Image (cartoon, rainbow, N blue to C red):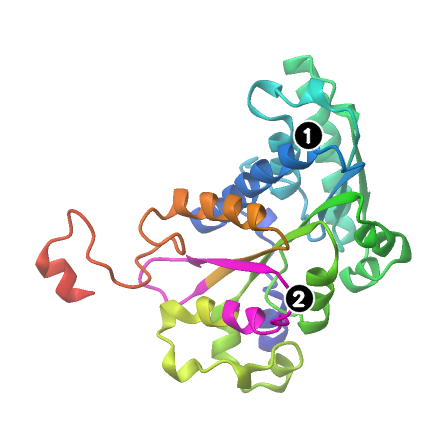
Amino acid sequence: MLWRYVINMGRDINKSMFDDATKLKLNIFGECFEEWFPVFLNSYWCKKLYIFDFFAGSGKDLDNNQGSPLVLLNRAKGASQKYCDKVKKEVSFLFNENRQEKSIELEQNVASHIKQCQQDNNCDCCVYQYRISSRNFQDIFSDTFIRDIFNNRNYAKFVLLDQYGFSQIDEQVFQKLVSFPRTDFIFFISSSFISRFREHPNTKKYIDTSKINFSELRPNEIHRGVANYFRDLISTKTEYYLHHFSIQKEVNRGNYYGLIFGTGHSLGMEKFLKVCWKEDPFSGEANYNIDAILRKNHCLECWEKM
């Protein structure tokens, strides 16, 4: 039972209120997408845009804070709906939520969100197509129709993978994501749990923990080490860019999670780094002082305690 919880992070975050770390994660998702969207919306070679949210949840928490699907739809409008009247090409969202009951809630929340948007802003959100599915991630990721989209060089793809735990993005999935043309992705991973259970056979099924030197990593560097593990999976002959952002779930607790972003273009990486440096103006890497750098307004006594 404990192991099942660790793998899947079984708590349903949509049945409670998002904590600060989750809100930060969602904000980074949104800002990253908002940087990505206009580039391809205005690109002459790009025929269609596809936005995938493979672990979409129900769309809201108990306090009506927006989950990733509604965040993406909101950001696609741009400030003051500036993109809504500029859509000259097909823009499609695919929201997938494996749990049937949450998928039904998601469909209701998305429909309600779009209707409210149209009423409040006189905004023709229906120019954005969307589809909601309720399938196992591995099944939908290997679906022929989905793979044809991923492999099409004339389509731009933004892939959000807000998995529970770490079991869905293994080496095989990661290699596929890196190989798809015109595809930028960002995924969440529970790095502390990988470290904590690194000797367990079920962890090694998904992550080759022997390739991560945990003994040389401080707890707050765990996500950096996990990101380097994925970075080393990329061929040195491939021009590809990977960056990460570490998130401390609770202050003074040892749980560190994080995001990993991948793109085949330097502009994509430049835009993600812009988001990261906005959140962390000291290192562009974490929501905490990851390298214990002496920062402005830190007294010597505070520095010595770090």
Picture disc at residue 169: 2
Question: Which amino acid type is shown beneath numbered disc 1?
Answer: Asn
Q: Is residue 99 left or right of residue 204?
A: right
Residue 168 vs residue 90, the one in the foreground: 90
Q: Is residue 44 left or right of residue 139?
A: left
Task: Return the residue found at the far front.
Answer: 237
Task: Decide: few, some or many residues near mark 1? Use Cα within 10 Å; few <14, some 14-19, many ≥20.
Answer: few
Calculate the distance from the C-alpha at mark 2 to the C-alpha at mark 1: 31 Å
Question: Which amino acid type is shown beneath numbered disc 2?
Answer: Ile
Read off the magenta span. 227-256
Dot 1: what SS? loop
Q: Is residue 86 above or below residue 180?
A: above
- Is 239 colored magenta in this rendering? yes
Q: Residue at x 54, y 83 (%)?
A: 211
* Comes first in the chain, label 2 or label 1: 1
Q: Quadrant of the C terminus?
A: bottom left
Q: Is residue 119 left or right of residue 2?
A: right
Residue 125 vs residue 103, the one in the foreground: 125
Task: Decide: few, some or many residues near mark 2? Use Cα within 10 Å; few <14, some 14-19, many ≥20.
Answer: many
Q: Residue at x 79, y 29 (%)?
A: 89
Q: Residue at x 73, y 41 (%)?
A: 105
Residue topped by disc 1: 42
Q: Is residue 24 above or below residue 193?
A: above
> Does the image show residue 18?
no
Q: Nearer the viewer, mark 2 or mark 1?
A: 1
- Picture quadrant of residue 73: top right
Residue 91 vs residue 93, the one in the foreground: 91
Picture coordinates of residue 117 (x, y %)? 67, 21
- Picture quadrant of residue 208: bottom right
